[in-house]
Each structure stands twice: as C-alpha cells, then as structure tokens.
Amino acid sequence: MEKEGAPSPDMKVHLFLPEGERRVLEVAPGDFDEGLLGSDFTYESLRMHMPIVVGQATLLNEPVWAIEAAPSSQTTRQISSWAVAHFYLAKNFHFLMVADYYDSEAGVTRPSVPVKRMRVESLKQIDGVRTATRITMVIGSNHGSVLTLKDARFSMASLDLDSHLFNPDQLPALGEKVRQGQMSEIMREIGK
C-alpha cells in the first residue's frame, strides 16, 4: 500500500518470483515497508544512517558488536516505520545476528520495547560458510514469520558470474531454466 505523498527514496527494488506469472516486478517506494510475500520482512528494514558501535555481547556463543542506526534521510524517516534500529553483528564472520527496530528514539541509555525483532536462531557451517538456517521476524507481541534454510551451495563462488544474468529483464528466463533443471545451459551462460 503506497503512503500518500511519500517521496521516492533513492533505492530501487526488483522482485522475481519463478512461480506464478514469472515476470519481474518493480516494488514501488511506497511499498518498501510492506511485508514481502505476506511476511514480516520488509525492504525498508535495513535502510539506515552510517551506524555507530554502542556495545558488545555474545549471541549463539559468538561475540557480536551492538550497532545503532537510524533512517538515512528525512525522506526515509517520513516513510519508515522505525526511528532507531539496533543491529548485532558477529565479529568473527561479519553476519547480522539480531535486529531490533524502535518506533521512537530508543537507545542504549533509553531502552524500550522494539516494534519489530529479527533473530538468527541457528547457524550451520555449509561449504565453509557460516550460514543462518533459521531466522525469525516478530512484529509487536503477536505476529511473526520464520525463514528456514533447507539447502545451500556455496561452492560455485569461484565461478566468474556474468552480471547481465541478474538484470531484472533477464530473471524470468534464468528462473525458467532453473525450474526446468537446465543447469548445464546456465553454467555455460555463467562461463561466458
């Protein structure tokens, strides 16, 4: 739902869903705070000012930095559902472990209850990469979504990926090839 009179932020978001109509959608700036596919995860959630480190902690037996951030501009503040966010980043593998979003100027010295909370609940080493296998996003006290990673492959990282494959107008064709199991053709295109 687009907010009346909301200025257009400086971010473009394209979404391709291989099921359904198989077309690339551009997400309107007024919709950045809407839930992705009906979930509690939004595009707006991670737009911020340059963050500042405000503390340290331990989460899932990993040392983390506590970072405080705010929307990047007056434009973003006008359409954002949060005023301040606290992010907890793993020190040893630079991964977002926790995010708390506040609707007012909450801070370390003025704590309050977050309006939205993201938590990495489990991690797994996959192909040498520390990976989140379960993430929750909770809004308020009664609504939440869970992302569960069933499979991941990172061994393809050494390939020279042709960036044109990921242009919004190319995603439907790439998605169709993946859906049809045409991995050898995709690998040939990647190698170009």
Image (tube, helix red, strand yellow):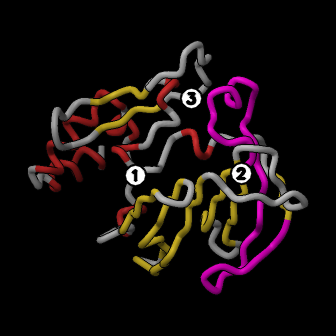
Q: Tag on residue 160?
A: 1
Q: Are marks 2 and 1 in contact (CB under 8 Å)?
A: no
Which residue corresponds to mark 2? Answer: 85
- Decide: few, some or many residues near mark 2? Use Cα within 10 Å; few <14, some 14-19, many ≥20: many
**Nearest to viewer (mark 2 / mark 1):** 2
Q: Quadrant of residue 73?
A: top right
Q: Position of residue 4 (x, y in %)?
A: 55, 15
Residue 23 in the magenta stretch? The answer is: no
Q: Reply above or below: 45 against 168.
A: below
The quarter in which the N terminus is drawn is top left
The quarter in which the C terminus is drawn is top left
Q: Position of residue 64 (x, y in %)?
A: 72, 73
N-term-proximal mark, 2 vs 3: 3
Q: Tag on residue 125?
A: none
N-term-proximal mark, 1 vs 3: 3
Q: Amino acid at mark 2?
A: Ala
Q: Tag on residue 11?
A: 3
Magenta span of residues: 55-84
